[in-house]
Image: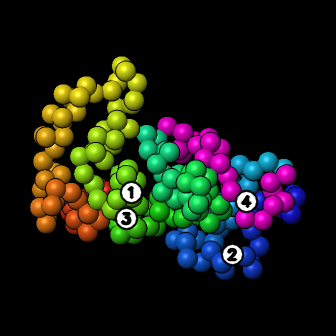
């Protein structure tokens, strides 16, 4: 591979037809992925890029959910947030303009479901708020402020169609379907 590591052969491209991205973008994605690899890693098949290196990408660097995004798209058994090229393509596909509302809402739900239990609850909402406000002593909400905010978030209660105290993927997608700005 060596100097050709940043090029994806047309024969390999057929393996990635499931992605929403068009062919030229897949080639560009592979080039960006290869730029994250060391010279030695470029010769290894099925290499994983560490979350630390993925987070150097400008698109993720300042995203408050950057670590959560890596964990959601990572197929690593170690749950370390590292990504294979296929994981990287899935990430790019989900965030592309071509992704459907169903795909975008599915991954948004998974990103907001911090405890990976298949529901959004007050604990997930608290972690979401902490991601948005920052987790330093200067920016973190006090326990009382957090409790008040969570109690005042009526959208969580309105989204809970089955009234079980949590929002599942179906309920989340129902709410998102009424928000045309979500896809943008």
- Identify which residue is drawn at 28% across, 45% down: 123
The answer to whether residue 77 is visible is yes
Of callouts 3 and 4, the N-terminal one: 4
Of callouts 2 and 1, the N-terminal one: 2
Q: Is residue 59 magenta?
A: yes
Q: State the residue position of label 2.
A: 13
Residues packed near mark 3 inside 10 Å, few (<14), some (14 to 19) or many (20 plus) = some
Of callouts 4 and 1, the N-terminal one: 4
Of callouts 3 and 1, the N-terminal one: 3
The answer to whether residue 57 is visible is no
Say which of marks 3 and 2 sits in front. 3
Residues packed near mark 1 inside 10 Å, few (<14), some (14 to 19) or many (20 plus) = few
Q: Are marks 3 and 4 in contact (CB under 8 Å)?
A: no
User: Label 3 vs label 4: CA separation?
Assistant: 26 Å
Q: State the residue position of label 1.
A: 116
User: Label 2 vs label 1: CA separation?
Assistant: 32 Å
Image height of 151 relative to 133, above or below? below
Say which of marks 3 and 4 sits in front. 4
Furthest residue in direction right, as rendered: 2
Of callouts 4 and 2, the N-terminal one: 2
Q: In the image, residue 62 lies at what x, y percent?
A: 49, 37
């Amino acid at each position: 591979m060596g100097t050709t590591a940043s090029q994806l052969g047309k024969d390999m491209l057929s393996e990635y037809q499931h992605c929403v991205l068009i062919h030229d973008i897949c080639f560009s994605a592979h080039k960006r992925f290869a730029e994250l690899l060391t010279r030695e890693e470029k010769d290894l098949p099925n290499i994983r890029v560490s979350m630390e290196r993925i987070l150097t990408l400008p698109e993720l660097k300042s995203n408050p959910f950057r670590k959560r995004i890596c964990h959601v798209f990572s197929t690593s058994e170690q749950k370390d947030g590292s990504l294979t090229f296929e994981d990287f393509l899935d990430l790019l596909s989900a965030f592309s303009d071509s992704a459907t509302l169903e795909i975008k809402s599915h991954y948004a739900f998974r990103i907001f479901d911090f405890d990976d239990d298949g529901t959004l609850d007050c604990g997930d909402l608290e972690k979401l708020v902490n991601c948005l406000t920052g987790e330093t002593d200067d920016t973190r909400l006090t326990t009382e402020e957090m409790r008040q905010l969570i109690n005042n978030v009526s959208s969580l209660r309105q989204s809970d169609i089955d009234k079980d105290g949590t929002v599942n993927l179906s309920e989340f997608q129902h709410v998102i379907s009424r928000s045309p700005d979500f896809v943008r």
